[in-house]
Every structure is written in structure tokens, then in C-alpha cells.
Image (cartoon, coloured by chain):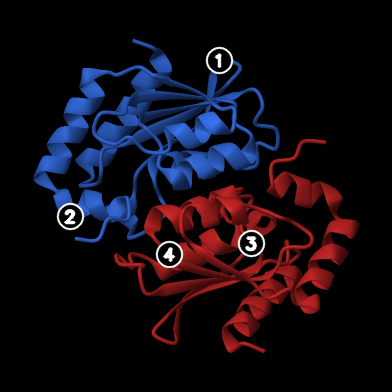
Chain colours: A red, B blue
Amino acid sequence: MDRFMEAAIGEAKTGLAEGGIPIGSVLVRDGRIIGRGHNRRVQEGDPIKHAEIDCLMQAGRVKDFRSTVLYSTLMPCYLCAGAVVQFGIPKVIVGEARTFSGAGDFMGEHKVEVIVLDLPECSEMMARFVRENPDLWNEDIGIVS
Amino acid sequence: MDRFMEAAIGEAKTGLAEGGIPIGSVLVRDGRIIGRGHNRRVQEGDPIKHAEIDCLMQAGRVKDFRSTVLYSTLMPCYLCAGAVVQFGIPKVIVGEARTFSGAGDFMGEHKVEVIVLDLPECSEMMARFVRENPDLWNEDIGIVS
């Protein structure tokens, strides 16, 4: 498997082990990981700390995102897709979009190249988590039950 | 003036005094401020810490955003508008959209009510900052010079 997606999956597993939502992300430039993160809503009580956001915070002031690629184990939501569009990240590689269709169309409309790998490892980990913790997941994407 | 917008302007001024970009935001529910923040990119070296994001982080796990109103001294960009759309914040009150047109249309398409107060106090503060610090501002919205 793509070693960057492997690193993103590693982040997701770290999040799961911490009791959090298993979504991971890395930011890559010139074949090197320059940021990594995972969803930390549960761990830090912070609704903004989606995996991609945590990753971009950790990458810091990149300034020019035109040669970066963002990896995420799950299709980004509007919050994370908004960051991609605003900062001009041209390419997003996604582990799966089965458990959450997210904001793929929105990124496409803004000329972001979105590649979905459709990896069973990602969708099975996420599907299990959502089945066992529906309230936590719904809160993460703003669904009020 | 609306006391909540006054509080957002206060946050923007705090940011300016810290050497940062003068944009402030508050989140209101039931006539009470439940989160406040300002842009902290310069102060913390964090590109994600736009005013609205800082405000939402500070508000924490609100869970149900349907009765909240987000105030910002400047029209939100796609990152912050993405958070509004994803979390289901139904109303955004904006100080000005003269210096940056942002993602107002995107929020409108997603049924967010966006009210622009067009306050000279907000646009003059922002225009002065952009004039004196064009590189910092362009970095904030992902424009590469």
C-alpha cells in the first residue's frame, strides 16, 4: 500500500487506541511527510480537531500549499475540505468514502483532484467504530439525534 | 452597536495588539457568548487559527449548533464557512465583506443566513492592516505571491 496512506492509517489507529474517532491524515510535500494528525475531539474536547485539521495545525505555516498532497483515511467533511480549498491544496488522496460521502463534490467543483482508494482496511475500521459509537460519530459531523 | 459584534471587534483589537491579524469572532446562544476568539496565525504559527476557528475551539463540544449565531468582524473564508456548514450553524453575522468577499455565497447555498452589517470600524481596521502587511494577509487566505 501507498506508504503515506499507511502513515495516515497509523494515525487513525493511534486515535482509536486513545479512545478517539479512528481517522488519520498526513500532509506530504516532495515525497516527505510534513504534517500528521488524527481526530482528537474525544481526547481534547475540541470539535475542530478533525484529523485533517490536526494534521494541518501540526504542519504549521507552510505558506505555499501548491505542491502538497493531503492524505486522509476518510473523505473530508466541509470543514476540512474548506481548508483544502482555501489554502490551495491541489490533491487529496482518500482511504474510503463508503461510511461518509463528505465534501468530495465541493472539492471537485473547486478544481481539487480527489482520489478515493476505497481501502477495506479504512472502511471496516470506520464502519465498526460508527456501529459501536453512533452518537460520537454523529456529533463529529454535526448530526443532532 | 450590537453588543456581540462589539465583543468580536474587541477580540480583533486584542489580536492586533498582539501583533496578529485583526479579525475577531464570538459564538452566541440564548443571548449569551459561549465562545470567543481571534486570528492567531502570527502569534501561534498556526494557519488554522482563523478567528472563527479559534472561537469554535474555545466553545468546545457544543453538540447542537442549531440555536447558535456566529459573529465575525470579516466575511468567513472557506475554512471557517466549512465549519459553519458542517456543524449546522444557521446564522452568521458579519462586520464587513469589503476587504474580503470570502465564502458568503457558499454559505448561502447551504441555507446559512448571512447578514453583513458593513461597519466602517471593521473595514477600516482590516484595510489598514492589509495595506501595511500584505504578505501576512495573503498567507492567511492562501494567496501565494
Neighbour class for label 4 at 10 Å: few (<14), some, many (≥20)?
many
* Of marks 2 and 4, the one in the foreground: 4
Mark 3 highlights which residue?
A: A39
Give whichever of B102, A23 is nearer the camera. Answer: B102
Amino acid under disc 2 = Asp
| Mark 1 residue type | Gly
In three-dimensional space, the C-alpha distance between marks 2 and 1, rounded to whole angstroms, equals: 37 Å
3 or 2: mark nearer the eye: 2
Q: Are marks 1 and 3 on the same chain?
A: no
Q: Secondary structure at mark 1?
A: loop
Instruction: Specify the amino acid type for callout 3.
Output: Asn
Instruction: Return the disc, 3 or 4, that comes first in the chain's sequence.
Output: 3
CB atoms at circles 2 and 1 under 8 Å apart? no
Q: Amino acid at mark 4?
A: Ile
The residue where tag 2 is placed is B135
x, y percent for residue B20: 24, 46
Instruction: Name the chain under label 4.
Output: A
Q: Are marks 3 and 2 on the same chain?
A: no
Q: Secondary structure at mark 2?
A: helix
Horizontal side of residue B35 vs B51, given as left or right: right
- Same chain under badges 4 and 1? The reply is no
- Between disc 3 and disc 4, the foreground one is 4
Residue with the mark numbered 4: A89
